[in-house]
């Protein structure tokens, strides 16, 4: 019998500490915030292959049941990881990007993000929604930056899954048989 278990795969990009500091800055141009997030996603693809390989190993260990992937914000490390899972299942890239962007639809800007910002900086503080969302949300260019890093080094997601993450065609077929409707 397959028992529920908990596994932790710490993925802490070097830029995570810098991201927390970035939230503290008030007058950063939007383009700089976007560039910062692009760099984080490139880093995830380039430098955390072993971590995502462990994620797939854990996923393959589950013979029957679900799988939860999460992180502190649930958008960068998790977003890239879930995009890889969807690719491994054979989901079209456009659909993967659309799924990734759903983060922005479920992110409660007013009650969660803005409330936290006001608690930190004071109720009278004002914030540019787009500038805050550049860090708190996701943009297509973030995921595309990870794909560009993958393309540069591995000639595409398929080769990345196989060569960097160790997920060969047989393993992908196992995942498809478990997680796709027939």
Image (cartoon, helix red, strand yellow):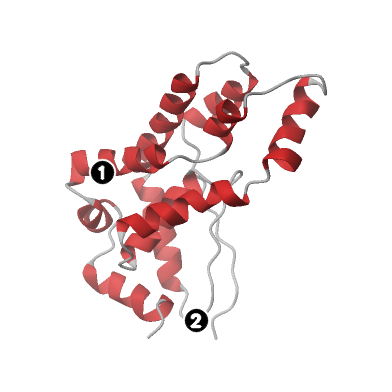
> N-terminal of the two: label 1 or label 2?
2
Residue 43's place in the image compared with 107, above or below, is above
Q: Residues within 10 Å of mark 1 (few under 14, many from 20)?
A: many
Q: Residue furthest right?
A: 123
Q: Residues within 10 Å of mark 2 (few under 14, many from 20)?
A: few
Report the residue that reaches farthest toward the top: 27
29 shown above or below 109: above
| Residue drawn 55% across the image and 54% down it | 8
Q: Give the quadrant of residue 23.
A: top right
Where is residue 91 shown, x and y percent of the image?
33, 65
Nearer to me, 23 or 61: 23
SS at badge 2: loop
Looking at the image, residue 39 sits to the left or right of residue 163; the answer is right
Q: Check disc 1 and report the residue beneath it.
A: 150
Q: Considering the numbered disc 1 on the image, is that residue within a helix, a strand or a loop?
A: helix
Q: Residue furthest left?
A: 155
The residue where tag 2 is placed is: 64
Would residue 75 appear left or right of 125 to someone viewing this image? left
Establish if 81 lies above or below 178: above
Instruction: Count all numbered tags in the image, as a single digit.
Output: 2
């Amino acid at each position: 019998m397959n028992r529920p278990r908990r596994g932790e795969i710490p993925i802490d990009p070097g830029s995570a500490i810098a991201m927390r500091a970035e939230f503290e800055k008030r007058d950063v141009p939007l383009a700089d915030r976007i560039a910062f997030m692009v760099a984080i996603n490139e880093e995830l693809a380039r430098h955390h292959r072993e971590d995502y390989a462990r994620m797939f190993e854990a996923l393959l260990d589950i013979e029957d049941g679900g799988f939860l992937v999460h992180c502190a914000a649930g958008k960068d490390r998790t977003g890239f990881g879930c995009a890889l899972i969807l690719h491994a299942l054979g989901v079209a890239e456009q659909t993967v990007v659309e799924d990734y962007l759903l983060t922005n639809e479920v992110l409660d800007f007013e009650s969660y993000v803005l409330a936290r910002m006001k608690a930190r900086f004071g109720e009278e503080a004002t914030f540019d929604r787009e500038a805050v969302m550049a860090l708190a949300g996701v943009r297509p260019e973030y995921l595309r930056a990870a794909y560009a890093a993958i393309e540069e080094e591995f000639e595409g997601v398929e080769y990345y899954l196989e060569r960097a993450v160790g997920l060969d065609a047989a393993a992908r077929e196992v995942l498809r048989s478990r997680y796709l409707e027939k």
